[in-house]
Image (tube, grey):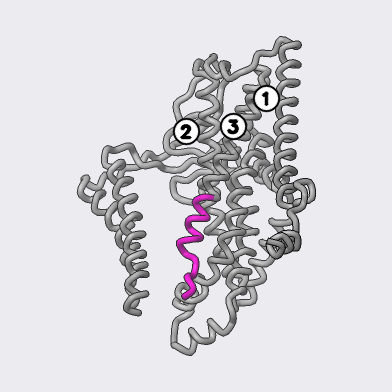
Amino acid sequence: MARDTAAAESRPKRPPPWHDPAVRAVVFQILFVAAIVALGAFLVHNTLLNLRRQNIATGFGFLEREAAFEIGESLIPYSPADSYAAAFLVGLTNTLYVAALGIVLATILGALMGLARLSGNWLIRKLAQIYVEIFRNIPLALQLFFWWGVLRWSAPAPGRAWQPLPDVFVSNRGIVFPMPEAHAVHSWLLLALLAGIAAACGLARWARQRQARTGQIFPSGWFGLALIVGLPLAAFVAGGAPLRFEVPALRGFNFVGGGVFSPEFAALLVGLVIYTGAFIAEIVRAGILAVSAGQSEAAMALGLTPWQRMRLILLPQALRVIIPPMTSQYLNLTKNSSLAVIIGFPDLVSIANTTINQTGQAIEGIAMIMAVYLAISLSISLSMNLYNRAVALVER
């Protein structure tokens, strides 16, 4: 009995709650979250109170009202009689369109320039270096003004348009080019292309699993390319091979027919691609240099060609270094597209600003812009993280 009492007295006593680090950490976190919530509630209450005092309407009911303003470029049908919601949708599609094109073209340009910076040819290497050093050190806004000025003020009138390619004309009205005439088989071509991409991805995954089990290499790249090209080609031939183009022709003071890129859209796309491509080039170069030189030497000792060394040895290891910063560049390109407002391209921010000026509901408009860019950024991050996980090297 006495021994148990002595043992109980010798055991360390639990400190009071206010001296326990674990308890203090939980309490501080609760207090911090409560303070944030209280601050947010105060700001919301104060904002709503001031809006009521100034008789400013709140809510998103204005989206159903008639917009009553023109939009110069639209990928979907739109007229001033449509609602503000339709106008907002036009801005969203324009933003997604230029961002998607910009990401693809900037990736191609950046990868080529990154490889050129590692070229053994002195001239190619220096030209790529000059490109990178010039365009990544000039603010993007200035580049957009420059390209817009070149297309809007330096380009000739439609009657004296430049013709860099057959049936492609560059003037101060934009860039016009031939477009395929609409045909029912085009939807089947798109489905065949998607099926080819899905089949190529499945084939590549099977080839990797097969190589991991047996050590045998299957040329999944060539077979995948054959699927991506062959399936749409087969659908095109089966549909009667409709290959008729609507060629632009000069009528009066402008071109009629074909497709057109306005000077604003072309300047925005060129500026985003060239600016972002300079950063991607450095990312690609750094990723390849991060691979040990012994890997290239071992590949050369095995008799692999330079293309095989790059495709099979260097790039798979460099991708784990390239993808994270590449994701940041994709996000930057998408967010930088909001600079379209300074050259008059009707993107999401431009149309939202017009809506805010007409309705006076700035909080709702800005909130919608923030929500859209947040959703786009999170989607890009999720996609790139999934791809990064798929190509990551698995250690045994």
Query: Which residue is found at the position 37% from the left and 74% from the top?
Result: 212
Read off the magenta span.
382-396
| Number of disc labels | 3
Return the residue nearer the eye: 307 or 124.
Answer: 307
Q: Is residue 209 above or below residue 274?
A: below
Q: As displayed, is residue 194 above or below residue 351?
A: below
- Spatial CA span between label 3 and label 2: 11 Å
- Which of 112 and 29 lies nearest the eye of the viewer? 29
Q: Position of residue 184 (x, y in %)?
A: 27, 38
Quick check: is 362 in the magenta stretch?
no
Q: Residues within 10 Å of mark 2 (few under 14, many from 20)?
A: few
Q: Is residue 65 visible?
A: yes
- Whether residue 160 appears in this view of the structure is no
Q: Amino acid at mark 3?
A: Pro
The one nearer the camera, 98 or 64, is 64
Query: In front: mark 2 or mark 1?
Result: 1
Most prominent secondary structure in the magenta stretch?
helix
Q: Secondary structure at mark 3?
A: loop
* Residue at position x 59%, y 34% in the image: 371
Mark number for residue 346?
3
Whether the residues at callouts 2 and 1 have beta carbons within 8 Å, the answer is: no
Judged by depth in the image, the label closer to the viewer, 3 or 1, is 1
Q: Amino acid at mark 2?
A: Leu
Q: What secondary structure is marked by label 2?
A: loop
Q: Which residue is mark 1?
A: 363
> Looking at this view, is 333 or 175 the one in front?
333
In the image, farthest residue toward the bottom:
301
